[in-house]
Image: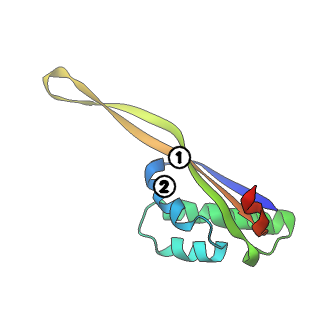
Amino acid sequence: MQVRAIAKDIGIPPRKMRLVTNAVKGLRVNEALAILQFLPNAGATPVSKVVASAAANAENNYNLNPDNLYILNIVADDSFRIKRVKPRSHGRAARILRRFCHVTVIVSDDPADAGR
């Protein structure tokens, strides 16, 4: 059975978040949480919270054993952008984009779900 958890509007750009999500894609939940604990990236903390939340959803809502779960898919999608203006020389202006992202984690206990 597939169970998911979503964290929205995380203040880290999706490109940097994908470095973290690609490191744990396809691993068991316990292994992924252990790896995320020691990753130096800033995105490791929110990703570990989402993975733990997906495992808790599976355990509490569907009575699945969290030791048997693995990460079927994990995606960092683009969210909104805060647009600001920075003054430059000769009266010009440069745009600053502060990017945010959503992280979606899908965990499963059945290896046959990978083909779906």
Q: Which residue is mark 2?
A: 17
Q: Nearer the viewer, residue 43 or 72?
A: 72
Badge 2, how many Cα within 10 Å: few under 14, some, many 20+?
many
Q: Which residue is mark 1?
A: 101
Up-down relation of residue 9 to residue 85 (above or below): below
Is 43 left or right of 7, judged from the image as shown? left
The type of residue carrying mark 2 is: Met
* Residue at x 73%, y 71% (from the top left corner): 69
Up-down relation of residue 61 to residue 76 (above or below): below
Whether the residues at callouts 1 and 2 have beta carbons within 8 Å, the answer is yes
Question: Could you say where residue 7 lies in the image, as x and y percent from the top left?
Answer: 62, 52
Give the image quarter of residue 83: top left
- Regarding mark 2 in the picture, which secondary structure is present there? helix
* Residue at x 51%, y 66% (from the top left corner): 23
Q: Nearer the viewer, residue 110 or 59?
A: 110
In the picture, the quarter occupied by the C terminus is bottom right
Question: Could you say where residue 82 lies in the image, as x and y percent from the top left?
Answer: 44, 35
Earlier residue among tags 1 and 2? 2
The type of residue carrying mark 1 is: Cys
* Residue at x 69%, y 56% (from the top left corner): 5
Give the image quarter of residue 110: bottom right
